[in-house]
Amino acid sequence: MKKQKKQTSIAGENHSRFDASVIEWSAPEYHRYEKGVLWYVIAAVLLTGIVFYAISTGGWTFAVAILVFAGVYALIYHKEPKRLNIQLSNVGIKIGVHRFPYSSLRAFWIVYHPPVLKTITIRFSGSFSPDVSLSLEDQDPAEIREFLRRHLTEWKNREEPFSSTLVRLFRL
């Protein structure tokens, strides 16, 4: 029983140290791009063309998959992104309710080309973990860089991933 109480107090200490943030801000969980009428017209024409091509070549499953993808995208797009509280502390990074100790993180890099692009990307230690990109909003990137360099390796001269560039350019 004494071991359980000791473990509980250690977990409580880690919890409070994560919450003792040095830098803190709020950002949307993803960027939602506004679309005009022209975007919807072009998307409808492309979607219709792809579905008709798939059906004409006997690709019924591909046609269904494209229609399901379009439906799921429409449902997700109309959902308002949640705002996440991001906290940098001396023990790790807290994003919303998720805590990541620095030992589970490999590196970070900042891409800062305002007003279009202001992000920090975090690479996890695991080989199958995806990178996490967070909007810096109005935060000072130099202050965040200086703080994180004490805990993580900074990868310099990194840019936005190609897939993120496509999403931004096509307003997906």
Image: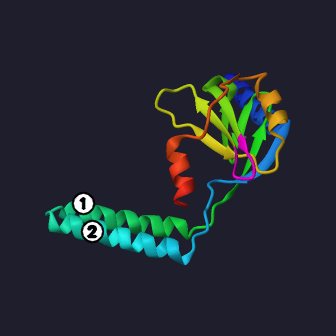
Q: Nearer the viewer, mark 1 or mark 2?
A: 2
Q: Please tell me whether mark 2 sits on a helix, a strand or a loop.
A: helix
Q: Is residue 115 left or right of residue 47?
A: right
Magenta-drawn stretch contains 23: no
* Residue located 86% across and 35% down the image: 22
* Amino acid type of the residue tagged 1 in the rendering: Phe
* Residue located 53% across and 66% down the image: 77
Q: If you read the primary sequence from the N terminus, does the residue marked by circle 1 or circle 2 appear first? A: 2
* Residue located 77% across and 41% down the image: 87
Q: Quadrant of residue 69?
A: bottom left
Residue 148: image tag: none
State how the image is colored: rainbow
* Amino acid type of the residue tagged 2 in the rendering: Val
Report how far apart the C-alphas of labels 1 and 2 lie in the structure.
8 Å
Residue 62: image tag: 1
Q: Is residue 87 left or right of residue 159?
A: right
Q: Quadrant of the N terminus?
A: top right
Q: Which residue is mark 2?
A: 51
Q: Nearer the viewer, residue 142 or 122?
A: 142
Vertical placement of residue 129 versus 150, above or below: below
The image position of residue 41, as x and y in percent, is 45, 76
Q: Nearer the viewer, residue 150 or 37?
A: 37
Bounds of the magenta segment = 112-118
Q: Is residue 41 left or right of residue 94?
A: left
